[in-house]
Image (cartoon, rainbow, N blue to C red):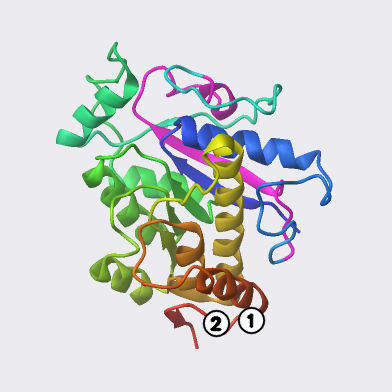
Amino acid sequence: MNNIRIAIIGVSTRSSSLIHGIHYYRNKKPVDAIGLLHWDIGGYKPGEIEVVAAFDIDERKVGKDVNKAVFASPNSTTVFKTYIPDIGISVQMGKVLGKDSDVMKRDAGRETSLLDNHKGSTRKEIVRILKESGAEIMVNYLPVGAEDASRFYAYCALDAGVAFVNNTSVLIASNPLWSLKFEYKNIPIIGDAFNIKIPIMASLNSAGIAIDAIRCAKLALIRGMGGVLLAASEYFCRQTIGRLTEEEPRNMIEQFINDEEYSCVHKKA
C-alpha cells in the first residue's frame, strides 16, 4: 500500500507539528502512540503519509526542503522528533493576495521576510504542481485572517481534484455554497479549524488530529465519497455545520470509519 500523498498550504508552526508527528509515529507501535483516534484507519498507519508538495510566500521557507523549512523562523512548534531527514521536496512559491499578504506579514514576525517583489504562482501553475506531484489531499494551514488565500487554494483543490482538509477558521466546509462546490465535483472536504482538546500537549495533539483527518479523507477518496465529510468535520473541527451533543461526534466518526455509507453528503453512484 502506497503512502497517502499530501500538499501543505502554509509551512507554519501547525504544519511543522504535522510533519514532526508523521516522523514521530513511524517509529512507534500501537501501544506507544498517543493523540490518535486509531492506530489504523482505512488500512493506513499514522506514519504512512508523504508530503509531495508545499506552498508558502515567506523567503525563509520558499526554495528550501520542506523538512528544513518547518524549522525556519518564525515557526516555534514543540520539537518531539529531533531528526527529520530531507525529503527532496522544495517549498513552492504560493499566491500573494492583496490584503491577505498583510496578514501574512504580521504572522511572519517583526521583520518582514515575504517575497514582496514576487508576483506569486498563478492558480493554473499551482494546479499543475498539484497534479504533477500526485497529491491526493490538500491540508490548509494558512494563518487566521487569510480568507482570500484560503478560498483561492480551495479553488485550486477543486481544479486539481484533490481532497481539502481546512485547518483554518475561514468558513469553507461549513459554508453551504462551498459545500455544494465540493459535492458537485465529488471531492471530499473536512473542516473547519481543528479542535485542539488538550492544550498542554497542543503540538502532539494537533499532529494527531491532522493525521487522523488526512486518513479519513483518504478513506473517503477510496470509497468514492465527495462533499463535506460530516462525521470527520464534527469530530475533528471547531467550526462545523451541526449542533450535536458531546457524544454524537465520536459515535459518528466510528460509524464513518466502519461503514462507508455513513456520514457524507454525497456518494458517487
- Judge left or right: residue 51 versus residue 142: right
Q: Is residue 233 magenta?
A: no
Q: Which residues are magenta?
A: 43-71
Question: Which label is found at residue 262?
Answer: 2
Secondary structure beneath disc 2? loop
User: Is 100 or 152 nearer to us in this picture?
Assistant: 100
- Judge left or right: residue 61 versus residue 239: right
Tell me the distance, in whole angstroms, between the alpha carbons under discs 2 and 1.
6 Å
Q: Is residue 133 above or below residue 233?
A: above
Tell me where residue 55 sits by quadrant. top left
Label 2 crowd (10 A; few <14 / some 14-19 / many >=20): some
Identity of the residue furthest to the top in this view: 111
Q: Position of residue 143 (x, y in %)?
A: 33, 37
Q: Is residue 64 above or below residue 161?
A: above
- Judge left or right: residue 78 versus residue 44: left
Question: Which label is found at residue 259?
Answer: 1
Label 1 crowd (10 A; few <14 / some 14-19 / many >=20): few
Count of marks, rendered view = 2
Tell me where residue 126 sits by quadrant. top left
Q: Position of residue 72 (x, y in %)?
A: 48, 18
Q: Position of residue 168 (x, y in %)?
A: 36, 47
User: Is 255 or 85 nearer to us in this picture?
Assistant: 255
Quick one: quadrant of the N terminus?
bottom right
Q: Are marks 2 and 1 in contact (CB under 8 Å)?
A: yes
- Judge left or right: residue 200 versus residue 195: right
Identity of the residue furthest to the left in this view: 99
**Which amino acid is tagged 2?**
Tyr
Q: Position of residue 188 (x, y in %)?
A: 46, 67
Secondary structure beneath disc 1? loop
Q: Residue at x 67, y 77 (%)?
A: 258
**Which amino acid is tagged 1?**
Asp
Q: Residue at x 71, y 46 (%)?
A: 34
